């Protein structure tokens, strides 16, 4: 299995951008809600199975292995025409209503600190995570609902020839809240900081194993890795930056170091406003930060002014504007943000993912703008900012 010449061009484009060099043009891709994809196909008159990555020849994709602490089929607690409720390998009980975008977390098996002390992880190198189809929470319960997800290596192989494929792993907080619930994360950090710190260390070991396991399984077919780690909300950090630095940061650094030792760049996906620890991400070697939520007050042009080319950026196209803005407003936003691509270091995407309220034609218009005005040397006209470089 070999990459096509077009895929090699995309790989070169991505690698140059992440090394802060100017490729032929600014890379563009995204994450998409199922509801948006249905709307996009209908509004553009496309076939029901049209693949948006292939239609626009986007520049990269992400594939995730089974990251459940316990490898097991979903336990179906309720199944009807409008919704399903399942218990997953995280020990989470989740209700998915099919007419709503995201699922509801109803309960968690781990309800005490003693449960954390007794918690056992299935082997992160277990071949079922990478070579077998099956149920898993992150791939199966989200915007949509899917059982018996195809094996990780099959999904990598299905796109490898045509797209740079990034693997996927969570950092410790992203795993922790799925095991005990976000409320208990906040509460127990205050009540039982030592117990949480000890469990976080165990999560670091497990996550590093998942990272190594998928790299081994992919056999050189990964072009990079996404680390998922939400530690902030709209106004700031979810918990103390000092606690994050003491207990979460070392595990993130270890995964970044592992990726870099294999020549793989890292895109860190963290929602919310992480301004208080942004320099920490630069320090530990994050190659690009995603998604840079506009609604959390982040602006990629301002970030480029502040941090220069110390870190790459991936995202920041305001989906609220994308959904409601007219073409004049969209053009102004796109061309202004492309200033952050001067000297490389910028991948154009949404400021999280493309939701169902974005019109198909508006998505199409923005992609075409990036393709036209994102060619180097950039020609941004009246939106060219001289103090951004």
Image (tube, rainbow, N blue to C red):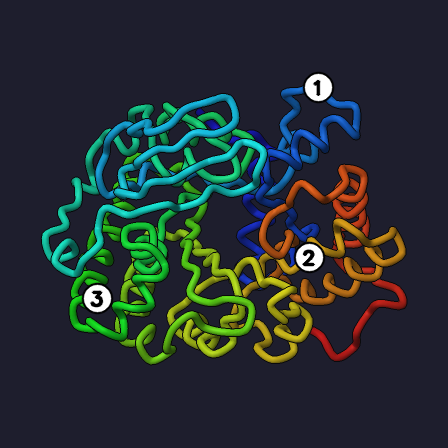
* Count of numbered circles on the image: 3
Report which quarter residue 18 is drawn in: bottom right
Horizontal and vertical percent position of residue 163: 54, 36
Which of pointers 3 and 2 lies earlier in the amino acid sequence? 3
- Residue drawn at (24%, 31%) of the image: 72
**CA–CA distance between discs 3 and 2?**
36 Å
Residue 330 makes an appearance in the image: yes
User: Which numbered marker is on residue 196?
Assistant: 3
Q: Secondary structure beneath disc 2?
A: loop
Disc number lying in front (1 or 3):
3
Horizontal and vertical percent position of residue 40: 72, 33
Q: Nearer the viewer, residue 18 or 272?
A: 272
Horizontal and vertical percent position of residue 86: 35, 33
Q: Is residue 358 above or below residue 229?
A: above
Circle 3 packing at 10 Å, graded few (<14), some (14-19), many (20+), is many
**CA–CA distance between discs 1 and 2?**
27 Å
Residue denoted by label 1: 47
Circle 1 packing at 10 Å, graded few (<14), some (14-19), many (20+), is few
Q: In the visual, does 253 lie left or right of 283? A: left
């Amino acid at each position: 299995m070999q990459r096509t010449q077009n895929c090699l061009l995309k790989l070169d484009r991505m690698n140059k951008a992440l090394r802060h060099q100017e490729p032929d043009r600014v890379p563009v891709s995204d994450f998409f809600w199922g509801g948006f994809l249905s709307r996009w196909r209908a509004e553009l008159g496309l076939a029901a199975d049209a693949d948006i990555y292939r239609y626009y020849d986007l520049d990269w994709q992400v594939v995730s292995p089974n990251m459940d602490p316990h490898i097991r089929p979903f336990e179906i607690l309720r199944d009807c025409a409008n919704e399903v409720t399942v218990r997953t390998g995280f020990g989470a009980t989740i209700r998915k209503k099919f007419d709503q975008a995201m699922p509801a977390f109803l309960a968690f098996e781990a309800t005490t600190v003693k449960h954390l002390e007794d918690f056992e992880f299935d082997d992160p190198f277990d071949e079922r995570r990478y070579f077998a189809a099956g149920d898993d929470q992150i791939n199966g319960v989200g915007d949509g609902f899917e059982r018996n997800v195809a094996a990780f290596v099959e999904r990598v192989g299905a796109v490898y020839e045509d797209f740079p494929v990034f693997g996927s792993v969570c950092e410790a907080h992203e795993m922790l809240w799925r095991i005990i619930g976000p409320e208990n994360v906040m509460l127990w950090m205050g009540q039982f900081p030592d117990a949480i710190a000890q469990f976080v260390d165990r999560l670091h070991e497990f996550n590093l194993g998942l990272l190594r396991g998928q790299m081994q399984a992919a056999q050189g077919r990964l072009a990079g890795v996404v680390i998922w780690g939400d530690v902030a909300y709209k106004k700031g950090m979810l918990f103390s930056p000092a606690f994050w630095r003491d207990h979460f940061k070392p595990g993130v650094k270890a995964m970044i170091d592992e990726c870099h030792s294999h020549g793989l760049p890292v895109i860190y996906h963290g929602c919310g406003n992480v301004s208080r620890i942004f320099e920490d991400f630069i320090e530990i070697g994050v190659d690009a930060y995603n998604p840079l939520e506009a609604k959390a007050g982040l602006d990629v042009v301002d970030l480029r002014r502040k941090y220069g080319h110390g870190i790459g950026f991936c995202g920041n196209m305001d989906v609220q504007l994308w959904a409601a803005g007219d073409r004049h407003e969209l053009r102004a936003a796109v061309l202004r943000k492309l200033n952050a691509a001067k000297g490389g270091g910028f991948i154009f995407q949404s400021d999280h993912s493309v939701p169902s309220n974005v019109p198909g034609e508006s998505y199409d218009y923005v992609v075409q703008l990036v393709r036209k005005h994102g060619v180097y040397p950039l020609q941004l006209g009246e939106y060219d900012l001289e103090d951004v470089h």
